[in-house]
Image (tube, rainbow, N blue to C red):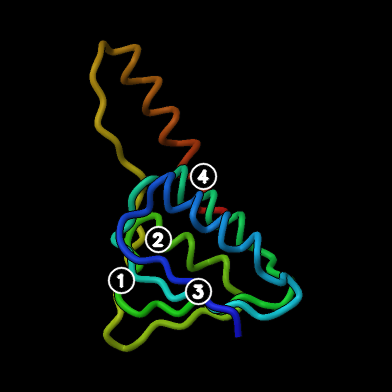
Amino acid sequence: MQKIVISGQITAETADQVRSIISGLDRSKPLLLELNSDGGSVQAGITIHNLLAGWQGGLTVDVVGWALSVASAIVQAGQVRRAHASALLMVHAPWMAATGNAAEFREQADLLDVVSKTMAAI
C-alpha cells in the first residue's frame, strides 16, 4: 500500500509537500495517511483535505497521535478513518488574532463565519 506521513504543524509547506508526494503516486491504488498533528494553517489543511478527498483507490487515514484543530478536517478526507485508543482528535470553531478598528474586527468575524461553515461542511 502507498503511504504518506503528516507529522507536526500544518503549514503551506506541508500542503506543498503532500502535493509533491502524491503527484508521483498511483491514484487508482490505495493510500494510507499516517497523521499526527496539532493543527496549524486552516488554508493549508483545507488544501490537503481537498488534495486527498476522493482518492480513487481509497484513502485510509490512521491517526497515530493527535489530529487537532485543522488536522481533524484532514481526517475527514479518508474513506476509512482510524484512531488508536490513545489518539486524540479535537474539533473547534476557527479563531484568529486580529488588530484594527471596529470595522476591521467585524470583517474578520465575517471571515471566521465563512471558515466555520466550510469546516463544518467537511
Which of label 4 and label 2 is nearer to you? Answer: 2
| Disc 3 to disc 4, C-alpha distance | 25 Å
Amino acid residing under circle 4: Lys
Quick one: quadrant of the N terminus?
bottom right
- Is residue 42 shown left or right of residue 30? left
CA gap, disc 3 to disc 2? 12 Å
Whichever of labels 4 and 1 marks the residue nearer the N terminus, that label is: 1
The disc, 4 or 2, on the residue closer to the chain's N-terminal end is: 2
Residue 10 rendering spot, x and y as whole percentages: 37, 53
Q: Is residue 21 left or right of residue 72?
A: right
Residue 33 percent location from the top left of the image: 50, 74
The secondary structure type at the circle numbered 2 is helix
**Residue of label 2:** 71
First along the sequence among labels 3 and 4? 3
Amino acid on which the number 3 mark rests in the picture: Leu
Q: Mark 1 or mark 3: which comes first in sequence?
A: 3
- Helix, strand or loop at mark 4: helix
Give the Cα distance between marks 1 and 3: 13 Å
Is the residue marked by circle 1 packed among few (<14), some (14-19), or many (20+) residues within 10 Å? many
Mark nearer the N terminus (2 vs 1): 1
Q: Mark 3 points at which residue?
A: 33
Determine the secondary structure under disc 3. Answer: strand
Q: Extreme front residue here?
A: 24
Give the residue number, with chain letter if any, for mark 1: 66
Q: Which residue is depicted at the point 61% across and 63% down?
A: 22
Q: Nearer the viewer, residue 75 or 120?
A: 75
Q: Is residue 24 left or right of residue 39?
A: right
Q: Which mark is residue 117?
A: 4
